[in-house]
Amino acid sequence: MRGVGIAQFGGPEQLELRDDWPLPEPARGEARVRVAMAGVNYIDIYMRSGQYAKSQTYQTPLPMLLGMEGAGTVDALGEGVTDLAVGDRVAWCVTRGAYADFAVVPAWKLVPVPEGVDWAVATALQLQGSTAHYLTHSLFALQPGHTCLVHAGAGGVGQLLIQLAKSRGARVLATVGTESKATIAMARGADATILYRHTDFRAAVRTLTQGAGVDVVYDSVGKDTVHDSIRCLKRRGTCVMFGASSGQVEGIAPLELAEAGSVFFTRPHLADYLQPHEVRQRAAELFTLVADERLSVAVERTYGLAAVAEAHRHIEGRNTRGKLLVDVAAP
């Protein structure tokens, strides 16, 4: 079968489209999916580059197929799978191998895709949608009266984060890189935007909150922002660093958290918020929000399998204005 993977860690040039990957066979409790669409996410960059080489949660054995998010139809069932049928429309995330014609996925990770939901939306709501959902509903459950700061507010996750935060009744401040991105973030419901390339976002947050700071920062940027993110918090606030588009953070000194107001810092993995009892519940809530037109998914661009390296370069350039997808079914 066709698939895009790597034989060694490195840059986008390591990505290779091959047509001789072995067809995977589902083991007990698994299903094989004929992939229609795959998502491109920063976790794919971390895996390709070797940043997750020592991760126990997201293992990266070489050689390996990439792609942690996809959607398609069930093609075959492993022993013991009784809640799925061949031909079912499904989607998933946090199982590697979506950049391929077929992927084998644990059955409990597959969520039903409602009729009328296209593959693009179904795919985007998996990894990015589930990320925005757990951040706003579980890790720090926003409530009316809360104020949050969302970094990269015009990106794929950022746009979903803003919308879900507003649905919870929170006030949303968003950092963006350009005026055009500010327009996108405001259209998604942000109460204020901060052009971080021209403005000290820490000072801007203090001004916008009359010196109080925010209850929570959702930081996907990492190295360039996290220390100032911590200083944007209210006393006993929470800084959530869920990504590192500018580079990994080597350390946070405990005293730094104390001096910022006895604040909390966490660096979560999505996989820990997609346990068996949560996967389909989160997906169902997201699909309902889309059906009710209370959540919009912005797809910026769709690539073919042969252009996955181009997609990786684009997302690493930090210029995205929505979801990047791979049309696996395209010739």
Image: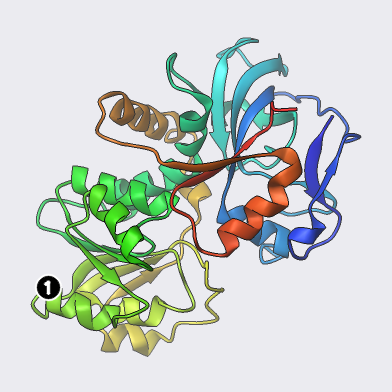
Secondary structure under tag 1 reads loop
Q: Is residue 301 left or right of residue 147?
A: right
Q: Nearer the viewer, residue 55 or 91?
A: 91
Q: Position of residue 173 (x, y in %)?
A: 22, 63
Q: Residues within 10 Å of mark 1 (few under 14, many from 20)?
A: some
Q: Residue at x 20, y 48 (%)?
A: 166
- Identify the residue position indicated by label 1 in the image: 209
Q: Quadrant of the N terminus?
A: top right
Q: Nearer the viewer, residue 309 or 206?
A: 309
Total numbered labels: 1
Quarter of image, res 4: top right
Q: Quadrant of the C terminus?
A: top right
Q: Position of residue 181 (x, y in %)?
A: 35, 59
Q: Nearer the viewer, residue 123 or 325?
A: 325
Q: Nearer the viewer, residue 320 or 18?
A: 320
Query: Does residue 261 appear in this view?
Result: no
